[in-house]
Amino acid sequence: MSVNHVDVIIIGGGASGLMCAASAGQRGRRVLVLDSSNKVGKKILMSGGGRCNFTNLFVEPNNYLSANPHFCISALNRYTQWDFIALVEKHRIPYHERKHGQLFCNDSAKDILAMLLAECERTQQVTIQTHCQIEKITTVNDGEHRFHLQTSKGQFACQSLVIAAGGLSIPTMGASGFGYEVAKQFGHQVLPTRAGLVPFTFSDNIKAVTERLSGLALEVSMTAKDSTCFNENLLFTHRGLSGPVALQLSNYWQLGETVQVNLLPQLDIASWLKEQKQQHPKSLLRTQLIPLLSKNLVLELQTLHWPSYAETPLAEIPDSALLTVAEALQAWQLKPSGTEGYRTAEVTLGGVDTRELSSKTMESKKQKGLYFIGEVVDVTGWLGGFNFQWAWSSGVAAGEFV
């Protein structure tokens, strides 16, 4: 069987893979992108509710989690959010800013995918092959090529091999552990993986509470055991707690730990309750709280935290009891039984150990010509466009050297 020879093969036609292909193609490299699914860029198309939160105005290294936290700095500094925004503007894609510096397409995530494909086509150096299963990767040393790939679409040889196969999140999109298997094949350490940016689930009495409150959203602050804190919307669901604040905190939460919810972060509740007691002595506690929260939530909290004072006028509730209520509202301790897992996770935490990669080029320190980019690497961003920015930055970092 004849072997097709190219300069670069990129396994994975997602955000990082397409960005790398465009970057390498612009250097005149002959690039082949291989993807197992029926079309490339599926996660781009579904992201941001179909509007694609493609980057963030405030990208900093501390927006990323990694066992090697300095690793991401080089790539993020060399291809910044401003570089990607300039590319979006060059393609005249209308976009808007939402809170916390998040940038979204005005129309559709399809605009971002079309832009990446146009950048690949512009070079006339990039070929994309879908429905392609990788069966075997071997190393060769004929002076010109380092890797030989046996696939469902034939045999290929290349000088540089880029693994942009993504993580384990959203298996319905074709996610698999393929990239980790390749890393292990070439002697790389893969750090333990788990679902990230994912809703919490409960198995105790809170599960029934979240079911009854399903659909309710409110702005809260939520804190993990390590004191990491986020202020965002919390959404009650049939399965537990979701919304941006829960997703953000899930990256910092470990099984068995509690999380703390402040339902009224803008208020000093203890002082406020004492004021209500003086100003509205005959009123019930729930009557004063309902304007601040929602009636259904207050009734659930009443059952959980002050059932014996439910029908007691404020004047007759001891200050010590009001302090206990204040603590329950501002430091509500909840213990998730788990998360919804990879099925709904937006990202995968962990992955290829970055200590074995060059932070400048993404190249393996163990196998010349082998590169790892995007989600397969142990770099995970916050919710809000940070993971896409890592895809663009790591893709360009490798694309400039393959």
Image (spheres, rainbow, N blue to C red):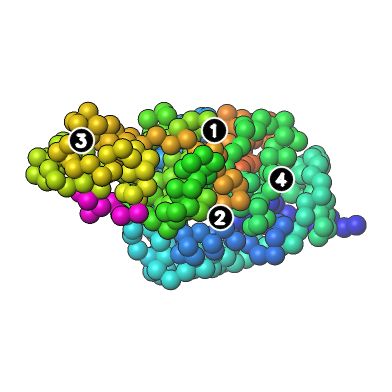
- Residue on which the image places disc 1: 255
Q: Nearer the viewer, residue 250 or 321?
A: 321
Circle nearer the N terminus (1, 4): 4
Can residue 358 be seen in the rendering of this structure?
no
Q: Which quarter of the image is occupied by the N terminus?
A: bottom right
Tell me the number on the disc at residue 178.
4
- Would you say the residues marked 1 and 4 are in contact, meaning their CB atoms lie under 8 Å apart? no
Find the distance from the CA under tag 1 to the CA under tag 4.
26 Å
The amino acid beneath tag 1 is: Leu
Find the distance from the CA under tag 3 to the CA under tag 4.
61 Å
Badge nearest the viewer, 2 or 3 = 3
Badge nearest the viewer, 1 or 4 = 1
Secondary structure category for the residue under label 2? helix
Tag 1: Cα neighbours inside 10 Å, few (<14), some, or many (≥20)?
Answer: few
Circle nearer the N terminus (2, 3): 2
- Would you say the residues marked 1 and 2 are in contact, meaning their CB atoms lie under 8 Å apart? no
Q: Position of residue 77 (x, y in %)?
A: 42, 42
Magenta-highlighted residues? 287-296
Magenta run includes residue 400: no
